[in-house]
Image (tube, grey):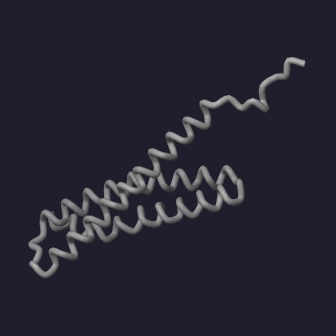
């Protein structure tokens, strides 16, 4: 299990970069009204979320293989809490985004309806 504790630092930076860049892309795309940038942002956030779950799993397996000294337990608890909170926030954002996308696509755009005149 010690291999997981050595792999975790290599894994952790990729999902963090995806989540941050995805958030920036989506905000920029909405501000500039560029749908392709919004789509790229959503992809990065979704892929980053799933990569974060893998990274959290590797981190948990790494912790199980370590003998943690008492003075590091507090830091480790905060580290795990931060990781789980980040994953939960992005999961909530993905769920809300998916629900809002479904609501927006289910409404009929009145301006596109054929006129009866």
User: Residue at the spot x=61%, y=34% of the render?
Assistant: 105
User: Residue at the spot x=27%, y=65% of the render?
Assistant: 81
**Residue closest to the eye, 110 or 24:** 110
| Quarter assignment of residue 34 | bottom right
Q: Position of residue 70 (x, y in %)?
A: 9, 78
Q: Position of residue 102 (x, y in %)?
A: 55, 36
Question: Which quarter of the figure is the N terminus placed in?
Answer: bottom left
Is the residue 76 above or below the residue 97 in the image?
below
Which residue extends farthest bottom?
Answer: 71
- Left or right: 6 as drawn, with respect to 94: left
| Quarter assignment of residue 2 | bottom left
User: Residue at the spot x=35%, y=55% of the render?
Assistant: 88
Q: Position of residue 19 (x, y in %)?
A: 47, 61
Is the residue 22 above or below the residue 75 in the image?
above
Question: Which quarter of the figure is the C terminus placed in?
Answer: top right
Q: Position of residue 55 (x, y in %)?
A: 31, 60
| Quarter assignment of residue 86 | bottom left
- Left or right: 40 as drawn, with respect to 73: right
User: Residue at the spot x=46%, y=51% of the render?
Assistant: 93
């Amino acid at each position: 299990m010690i291999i997981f504790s050595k792999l975790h630092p290599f894994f952790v930076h990729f999902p963090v970069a995806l989540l941050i860049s995805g958030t920036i892309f989506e905000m920029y795309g909405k501000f500039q009204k560029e749908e392709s940038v919004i789509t790229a942002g959503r992809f990065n956030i979704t892929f980053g979320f799933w990569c974060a779950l893998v990274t959290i799993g590797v981190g948990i397996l790494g912790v199980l293989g370590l003998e943690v000294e008492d003075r590091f337990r507090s830091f480790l608890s905060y580290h795990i809490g931060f990781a789980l909170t980040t994953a939960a926030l992005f999961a909530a954002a993905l769920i809300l985004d998916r629900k809002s996308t479904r609501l927006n696509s289910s409404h009929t755009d009145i301006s596109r309806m054929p006129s009866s005149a």
